Image (spheres, rainbow, N blue to C red):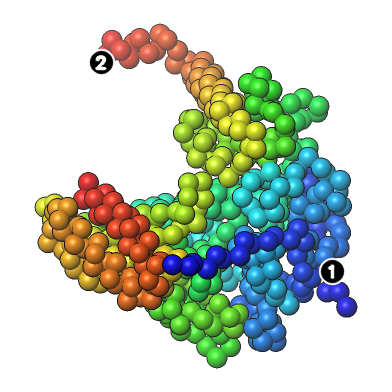
Amino acid sequence: MSPAKAHVAFSVNAVSYEMDVEPSWTLLDVLRDRLDLRGTKRGCGRGECGACTVLLDGESVNACLVLAPEIDGREITTIEGVGKGGALHPLQKAFIEEGAIQCGYCTPGMVMQGLHLLARSPGADREQVLEEMSGNLCCCGGYHKIATAVARTAAEMRQERIMMIKEAVGRKNRKTGAGKGAARAQGRKR
Amino acid sequence: MQTQKRPARVYCSSLKPFEYFAPGSVSEALGILARFKGKARLVAGGTGLVVEMRARERAPEALVSLRCVKELGHAPALKGARIVISPTTTLSRVAASELLREKAPLLVAAALSIGTCQVRNRATIGGSVCRGRGRPPDIAPALIALGAALRVKDRRGERLVPAGDFFGDAGDPVRRGEAMIVQLQLAPQEEDERSCFRKQTACPGTDRGVASVAVRATLSRGVIARATVAAGGTSFTPARMKRAGETIEGSRGEMETLFKAAEVLADEVCAAGATRPAAGLARELLAACFIRAVKEVLA
């Protein structure tokens, strides 16, 4: 007699699902074989290559090591859910522009891990990128361009943030009347 | 001399069927473990267990998930003179904890030396300490040097097991699936203390430690006033290396003293059960880890 199935309710790329799963299935089996989301790749099956990286409640994990019953109540993001409304994410664009894709097998995992890194430390430098992405292997050896693409996106996001902060400060100053004149006046007082 | 070659691990794409339980309390989890008489295993992150199951090294009849056990869900906290950590805390949360970064940097360094970012986001500290006797955890020397103790619970009751004993026989009931760790306790690092964790892997690009050393020392004007040294490796039970610690006490890290202490450390490792060829390898690697760790503590 086969063991009882587990009932799980979860969401993938903001779409809710409910199903019965075999305890011995992994998240990777559910994504690829049940939901037909084949962007997440099957690699080594032991958490070493990172080809199956997805975000589980915002944290990057190896889908091949997560047992299917453990996804109950969790939010999963796969490579299919990264672009919004047909538009690519800036990280995906950077991968294309930097030529960071060779055979492409590792790319979904690389992008997902890159997204986790950018969400956690948006100002990451190249060294941090190499450290954080060390769990993703590229069988074509294209690490240099991959790291460049992620580091470039991080730098762009950092710049965007600075611009946003500057704009917000400018808006606040305009509202309170504290502009350049006020700053000059303060300077004279000092 | 002929050496026996270890057979290569063969990984299967599928796992053997097993029953799955997600109890809501520790007592319920212990009840399920007792029902399966050692044929059930606890699972928290599963990063180690799933790999062992794929390699057919383990084939549990049931897995008992700890994801719904609310009693175990707390963040690292300072309680009295001890830091308490839930066994289900992931290694990335250990590494990100402000409290642990300040009061137990040794543990943070050891946690960061394990696996990849993806693995650390799933793997738990409890799961890491419960590795089999043949594969002592890399985190063990850090726990021993921090004077850690583990609260172990079974159906008869609860007891506090020092980390040094846990990696020996005292941890066997947990590894056999008859008991479980419900809390880890550490002695926080004092302000005048410095510490360093060093690990040597089998080859670049892998996190599997062949030798690891944790050094915790109190410095007084550049002199090591008091030192705690703990070591772990593939061929021996992780333990506190008392004599190696005593050897470096009173020194300023002179190379002569460090080489002498490294020799003492290697002897202690042999006494801890390392086999002769492995001890030869351990001697070299441990010496390198140990000397670097002491140098960093003094830097």
The one nearer the camera, A153 or B46, is: B46
User: x, y (%) of residue B228?
Assistant: 26, 66
Residue located beneath label 2 in the image: A190
In this rendering, would B80 be left or right of A100?
left
- What percent of the width, then of the height, locates residue B17? 79, 70
Where is B211 relative to B80, above or below?
above
Closer mark to the observer between disc 2 and disc 1: 1
**Residue at left offset 27%, top offset 13%:** A189
Circle 2: residue type: Arg
User: Is residue A62 shown to the viewer in this render?
Assistant: yes
Query: Which dot marks residue A5?
Result: 1
Measuring from the top left, give residue B119's x and y in whole percent.
Answer: 58, 53
Q: Amino acid at mark 1?
A: Lys
Residue B84 to residue B32: above or below: above
Q: What's the CA distance linking mark 2 and mark 1? A: 74 Å
Secondary structure at numbered mark 2: loop
Task: Identify the image quadrant of the N terminus of chain A.
Answer: bottom right
Q: Which residue: 48% across, 67% down?
A: B2
Crowding at dot 1, Cα within 10 Å, few <14 / some 14-19 / many 20+, comes out as some
Residue at 50% x, 40% y is A131
Same subunit: marks 2 and 1 = yes
Sequence-wise, the earlier of marks 2 and 1 is: 1
- Residue at far bottom of view: B156
Read off the chain for label 1.
Answer: A
